[in-house]
Amino acid sequence: MKYKRILLKLSGEVLSGEKGHGIDFERTLEIAEEIKECVELGFEIGIVVGGGNFWRGKSNEYMDRATSDYIGMLGTVMNALALGDAFKQINVPVRVQTGVEMRQIAEFYIKDRAIRHLEKGRVVIFGCGTGSPFFSTDTASSLRAAEINADILMKATKVDGIYSKDPKKYKDAKKYDNITYIDVLNKKINVMDKTAITLCMEEKIPILVFNILEKGNLKKGILDEKIGTLVQ
C-alpha cells in the first residue's frame, strides 16, 4: 500500500453536480459511496471541502476582503455538514471539524484529535479552510495534509489532469502525466495557488489532480494506478 493516509480536496462545484450551485445531494451521496469503498480497503481519508458553490469572492468592490472570506468559510461548513450527513446515511463513521469554533454543529479542529479519528477508521471532514481569511481552501488542504502527515494530497476536479493550456479552448493543449512542483510554479499553471504548491513541495507531499466525476477514479488514484496528473 503506497498511500495509507489521504487528504482529499473537494471543490464545492463538484458537490453541486450539474446545477453548478448549491448542493446536489444525489451527487454528494455518490461521492460518499466511492470514498466508503476506499475506507473499507483500509485507507485513512481526510477531506477539505471548498465553498465555491455558495460563495466566490467579494460580492462588490467595497466589501471587506476578510468579511468575504469568512462568508466563504461558512459555505464550506454547509458542504462539510451535507457530506458528513451523506456518510452517516451509508453507515460510514465521520467527524466534521472546523477551523473556526462552532461547538453546536462541529468539533473544533485539533490536529491530534483528527489523527486519532483517522486511526480509528473515521472519515474526517475539515471545514472553514485554515480558519483565517486571505488563505484559500487549496492552501488549507496543503496545510491539513502536512499536519496529519498525509501520504498524498488528491485534488478532485472536473478535468482529467493538468494541461499546458485550457483544453476546452485549445485543441493542441498538452496533458501532463507527471510534472514537478517547480514547473507548476514557473509555468504559472493554475491548478492550486502558489502557497499550496510551495507547502507541498517543502513537505514532499505529492499532489494528484484527477477527475472525480469519472466513477472509480478515486480508488484508482489511491491504488496508484495511472490517472490524472501527479505533481512531485
Image: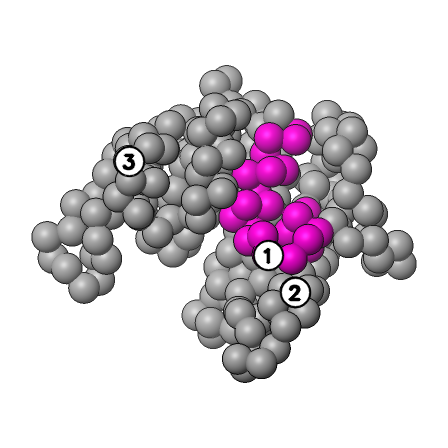
Circle 3: is it few (<14), some (14-19), or many (20+) Cα within 10 Å? few
Which scheme is used to colour this image of the protein?
Answer: one colour
The x and y percentages for residue 117 are 76, 33
Distance between the alpha carbons at the discs numbered 2 and 3:
31 Å
Q: What is the spatial separation of the Cα atoms under label 1 and label 2, in whole angstroms?
A: 7 Å
Quarter of the figure with the C terminus: top left
Residue type at mark 2 is Ala
**SS type, badge 3:** helix
Q: Name the quadrant containing residue 201.
A: top left
Depth check, front residue: 105 or 90: 105
Residue drawn at (38%, 49%), measured in percent from left and top?
A: 191
Q: Position of residue 75 (x, y in %)?
A: 65, 65
Q: Element under label 2?
A: helix
Q: How dense is the environment of label 1, judged by Cα within 10 Å: few (below 14), some, or many (20 and up)?
A: few
Task: Tell me whether circle 2 and circle 3 mark residues in contact (CB < 8 Å).
Answer: no
The answer to whether residue 39 shows anywhere in this view is: no
Sequence-first disc among 1 and 2: 2
Q: Tell me whether circle 1 and circle 2 mark residues in contact (CB < 8 Å).
A: yes
What residue is shown with label 3? Answer: 183
Q: Are marks 1 and 3 in contact (CB under 8 Å)?
A: no
Circle on res. 134? 1
| Amino acid type shown at disc 3 | Asp
Q: Magenta segment range?
A: 126-148
Which disc number belongs to residue 66? 2
Q: Nearer the viewer, residue 166 or 96?
A: 166
Nearest to the eye among marks 1 and 3: give it.
Answer: 1
Q: How many marks?
A: 3
Q: Residue at x 83, y 47 (%)?
A: 107
